Image: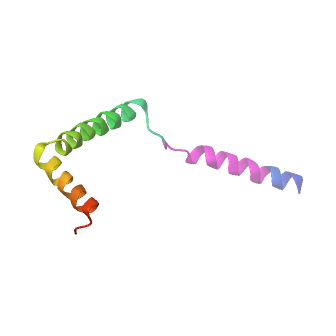
Amino acid sequence: MYKAVRARLRALVCGKRRGRGDGGMVTSEYATGIVAVVGFAVLLYQVLTSDSVRALLEDIVKKALSGQM
């Protein structure tokens, strides 16, 4: 029985090693992702701080605080 258990464990370990793929991101993928996120954040900041959007947001907040919907 010991030999059968040992053979099964060896098969499982070897199978896991063969089945391993490239599951994580490499440094260049992290860098590309960070650049994309920073670019999106800058774009979102520019949109939200524009005069027209700022006026709309202030209007919404004023209506919410005054109780008028």
Residue at horizontal 25 percent and vertical 62 percent from the top = 66
**Is 67 situated above or below 52?**
below
Residue 41 is left or right of residue 19, and the answer is: left
Residue 61 locus on image (x, y percent)? 24, 56
The front one of 39 and 55 is: 55
Q: Quadrant of residue 36?
A: top left
Identify the image's colour scheme: rainbow, by chain, secondary structure or one colour: rainbow
**Magenta part of the chain:** 7-23
Residue positioned 70% across, 50% down in the render: 11
Residue 39 percent across, percent down from the top left: 25, 36
Residue at image x 74%, y 47%?
Answer: 10
In the picture provided, is 51 more to the left or to the right than 63?
A: left
Quadrant for the C terminus in the image? bottom left
Magenta segment main secondary structure: helix
Rendering quarter of residue 31: top left
Give the residue furthest to the left. Answer: 52
| Image quadrant occupied by the N terminus | bottom right
Image spot of residue 62 (x, y percent) = 22, 56
Can you name the residue that lies furthest to the bottom here? Answer: 69
Residues 68 and 3: in front is 68
| Outermost residue, right side | 1
Q: How many marks?
A: 0
In reply to whether residue 36 is colored magenta, the answer given is: no
Q: Is residue 14 magenta?
A: yes
| 6 relative to 21 in the view: left or right | right
Q: Nearer the viewer, residue 32 or 46?
A: 46
Q: Quadrant of residue 50?
A: top left
Residue at 23 percent of width and 43 percent of height: 44
